[in-house]
Image (tube, coloured by chain):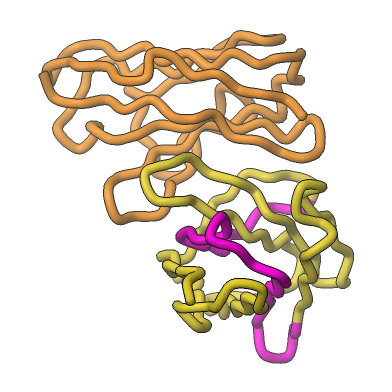
Chain colours: A yellow, B orange
Amino acid sequence: QVHLQESGPRLVKPSETLSLTCTFSGGSISSFYWSWIRQPAGKGLEWIGRISTSGGTRYNPFLKSRLTMSVDTSKNQFSLSLISVTAADTAVYYCARAEPDTANFDSWGQGILVTVSS
Amino acid sequence: EIVLTQSPGTLSLSPGERATLSCRASQSVRSSYLVWYQQKPGQAPRLLIYGTSSRATGIPDRFSGSGSGTDFTLTISRLEAEDFAVYYCQQYDTSPQTFGQGTKVEIK
């Protein structure tokens, strides 16, 4: 059974870096696209970016200057790094899987609430 | 970016009733790239419909999607208790992919 799990610090100080990891189990990480999506409390969904297992990335232009994603196929993990965070980056962060060349997110992690506060 | 506007914001209906949810795009979206999700409180979204009208694995046939161009619809033919949730449409025809703001289907 496919399972995704987000992990990382739940509290980040303003101007610092938000780093999260998503661990995938229940299959091979290969041959899928892996995305990060976030949701501020009480609000809608925002796509952050995606990475393929070959390392190719596509980022939301609104976050591109602050964003880096990476993948470690040997560990079935992919990661997110968002620099210079502000309170506006406070949200539940989800990792999700999609078939190649699609953004039909058929598997999601449970989400992790990250708060940016001093 | 393409802005998706969902209406109504909230839909108050009784179990057994029909729900019709609208998703309007600020520019044309190819049908293959329009998706619907369901989200319940405290849970991640769940894929319902992809390619405008194809049901995802395990989704009951009371859920259906239709539309083209800038106007898309999610229909729930007869609401069941577990269908009361928030529904989001999503497009990935044009980068960046975007989501609508959601329609909440609540019990009347």
> Within the image, what quadrant is residue B97 found in?
top right
Coordinates of residue A61 in the picture (x, y in percent): 82, 47
Q: Residue at x 77, y 40 (%)?
A: B96
Coordinates of residue A40 in the picture (x, y in percent): 46, 51
The magenta region covers: A72-100
Q: Residue at x 75, y 85 (%)?
A: A72
Looking at the image, residue A107 lies above or below residue B53: below
> Within the image, what quadrant is residue A28 found in?
bottom right
Coordinates of residue A24 in the picture (x, y in percent): 57, 76
Furthest toward the bottom, the residue is A74
The one nearer the camera, B62 or A35, is A35
The magenta stretch spans residue A95: yes
> Within the image, what quadrant is residue A53 found in?
bottom right
Looking at the image, residue A96 lies above or below residue B25: below
Q: In the image, B42: left or right of A41?
A: left
The one nearer the camera, A10 or B28, is A10
Coordinates of residue A8 in the picture (x, y in percent): 52, 83
Q: In the image, A11: left or right of A34?
A: left
